[in-house]
C-alpha cells in the first residue's frame, strides 16, 4: 500500500495527515494557534515551528505507518501567510531529503475542494467554500475550478469572528454564535448580495453596534448571511446546470447553514452534502489527498498568492 504525508500550514493550523493512494484517511493530526487578539504571522509561524515535528510524529503513530511506506510528501504551498507557508515547505523538503521521498506543493483551496469531493463522493458539484478567510462559489469549468461568486470583502468565518471579538465571545466565535442563535429571535440586518457576489463587512459593523440582546443579533446575523449564501449557491446550480451542492470549509460545521442549504437543494431536486467535520477545517489529510492527485510532480518553495483558478486541473 502507498501513502502520502500531507503537511498543512497556511494560517492558524499546523497539520499532518496520512492518506492512502486509494483515498483512505489514516491520520489527521494538528495543533491550532489560538489568540484573543488575532493572528500575527510571525507568532503563528513560531507556533508551527514548535509543533510541526510532534504533529508529524503523531500522524505516523496514529496511522501505524513507517517512513518506508510513505511514497509521497505534500505541503500547502499557498495561498496563506508566508511565514507559516515556509514552515510547512521547509519541513516537507527536509523530510523528503532525509527519507528520499518526492515532495510536491499544492494549493490549499483546491485541496479543500478535492477532499470535499472525495468525502462526499460527488462527481461534479457546485462547491460552496465557506471558511475563515474565504467565501466562494466554485465549480469546475473546463480545466480549472472557476470562481462564480465570492465575498467582496471578508470571508464569513472572519466576519463571524470579528463580530465575536467585539462582543467578547472569544475566538473562534462561529460555534459560540451558533449556540447563542438558538435562543434568539429576528431583528433586521442589511442583506448584501451583488450579482453572484456577497459582502459581509457592513452587516458585521451594523450587528456589532446593535444594542439588542446578543442572542437576537447572533440569530439574525446567521439567518441573513446564510440566506445570502443560499441565494448565490442556488443561482450557481441553475447557471452551471449542476445538481450537486458540496459545502466545504470550517463554517460547514454550522448546523443551521446546512439545514438552509439542504432545504434549498431539496426544493430544486439537487443533492446537498457537507464535508465531515474532521475534514472541513484546515488539516493535513486534504493536503495529502491533493498531493496524491498531483503525484508525479515535484516542487519547492511557497506560492502565497496562488488563486484557486491558477491551478490547472489535470488529474
Ligand atoms: P477554516 O478557515 O476553514 O479553518 O474555518 C474556520 C472558521 O470557521 C472560523 O472563522 C470559525 O469561526 C468558523 N466556524 C467554526 N465552527 C463554526 C460554526 N459552528 N458556525 C459558524 N462558523 C464556524
Ligand atoms: Mg482553509
Image: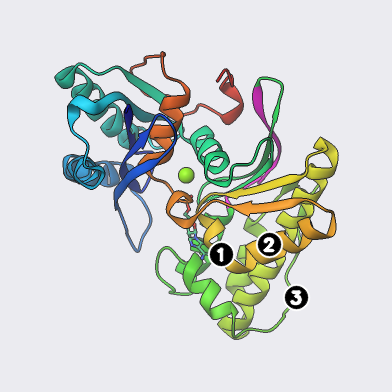
* x and y percentages locating residue 144 in the rendered image: 65, 24
| Classed neighbour count for the residue bearing mark 3: other residues with Cα under 10 Å, few (<14), some (14–19), many (≥20) | few
Q: Tell me how far mark 1 sits from mark 3, CA to CA.
A: 21 Å
| 70 left or right, relative to 190 | left
Tag 1–tag 3 contact (CB < 8 Å) = no
| Circle 2: element type | helix
First-in-chain label (2 vs 1): 2
| Residue wearing tag 2 | 226
| Classed neighbour count for the residue bearing mark 1: other residues with Cα under 10 Å, few (<14), some (14–19), many (≥20) | some
Q: From this viewpoint, is residue 13 visible?
A: yes
The quarter of the image holding the C terminus is: top right
Residue 314 in the image: above or below residue 192: above
Query: Is residue 72 or residue 98 the one in the foreground?
Result: 72
| 94 left or right, relative to 20 | left
Query: Is residue 121 or residue 144 the one in the foreground?
Result: 121
Whether the residue carrying mark 1 lies under 8 Å from ligand 1 is answered with: yes
* x and y percentages locating residue 264 in the rendered image: 78, 59
Structure colour scheme: rainbow
First-in-chain label (3 vs 2): 3
Tag 2–tag 1 contact (CB < 8 Å) = yes
Magenta-drawn segment? 144-155
Which residue is pictured at 41% across the width and 26% down the height?
291
Whether the residue carrying mark 3 lies under 8 Å from ligand 1 is answered with: no
| Residue wearing tag 3 | 188
- Front of the two marks 1 and 3: 1
Which residue is pictured at 19% across the width and 44% down the height?
61
Residue 185 located within the stretch drawn in magenta: no
Query: Is residue 14 or residue 225 the one in the foreground?
Result: 14
Residue 106: name its quadrant: top left
**Hey, which residue is sitting farthest front in the picture?**
1
Which mark identifies residue 254? 1
Q: Tell me how far mark 3 sits from mark 2, CA to CA.
A: 14 Å
Amino acid at each position: 500500500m502507498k501513502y502520502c504525508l500531507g503537511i498543512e500550514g497556511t494560517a492558524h493550523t499546523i497539520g499532518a495527515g496520512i492518506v492512502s493512494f486509494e483515498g483512505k484517511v489514516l491520520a489527521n493530526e494538528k495543533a491550532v494557534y489560538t489568540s484573543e487578539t488575532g493572528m500575527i504571522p510571525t507568532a503563528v509561524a513560531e507556533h508551527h515551528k514548535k509543533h510541526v515535528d510532534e504533529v508529524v510524529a503523531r500522524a505516523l503513530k496514529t496511522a501505524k505507518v513507517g517512513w518506508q511506506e510513505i511514497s509521497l510528501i505534500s505541503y500547502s504551498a499557498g495561498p496563506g501567510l508566508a511565514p507559516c507557508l515556509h514552515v510547512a515547505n521547509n519541513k516537507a523538503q527536509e523530510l523528503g531529503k532525509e527519507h528520499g521521498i518526492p515532495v510536491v506543493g499544492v494549493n490549499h483551496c483546491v485541496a479543500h475542494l478535492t477532499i470535499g469531493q472525495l468525502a462526499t463522493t460527488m462527481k461534479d458539484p457546485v462547491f460552496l467554500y465557506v471558511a475563515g478567510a474565504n467565501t466562494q462559489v466554485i465549480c469546475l469549468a473546463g480545466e480549472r475550478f472557476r470562481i462564480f461568486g465570492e465575498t467582496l470583502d471578508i470571508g464569513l468565518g472572519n466576519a463571524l469572528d470579528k463580530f465575536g471579538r467585539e462582543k467578547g465571545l472569544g475566538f473562534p466565535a462561529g460555534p459560540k454564535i451558533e449556540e447563542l442563535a438558538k435562543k434568539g429571535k429576528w431583528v433586521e440586518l442589511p442583506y448584501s448580495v451583488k450579482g453572484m457576489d456577497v459582502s459581509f463587512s457592513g452587516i458585521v459593523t451594523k450587528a456589532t453596534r446593535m444594542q439588542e440582546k446578543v442572542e437576537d443579533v447572533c440569530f439574525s446575523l446567521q439567518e441573513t448571511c446564510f440566506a445570502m449564501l443560499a441565494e448565490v449557491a442556488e443561482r450557481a446550480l441553475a447557471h452551471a446546470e449542476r445538481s450537486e451542492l458540496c459545502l466545504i470549509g470550517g463554517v460547514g460545521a454550522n448546523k443551521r447553514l446546512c439545514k438552509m442549504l439542504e432545504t434549498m437543494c431539496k426544493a430544486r431536486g439537487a443533492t446537498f452534502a457537507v464535508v465531515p467535520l474532521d475534514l472541513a477545517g484546515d488539516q493535513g489529510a486534504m493536503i495529502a489527498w491533493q498531493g496524491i492527485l498531483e503525484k508525479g510532480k515535484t516542487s519547492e518553495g511557497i506560492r502565497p498568492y496562488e488563486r484557486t483558478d491558477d491551478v490547472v486541473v489535470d488529474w
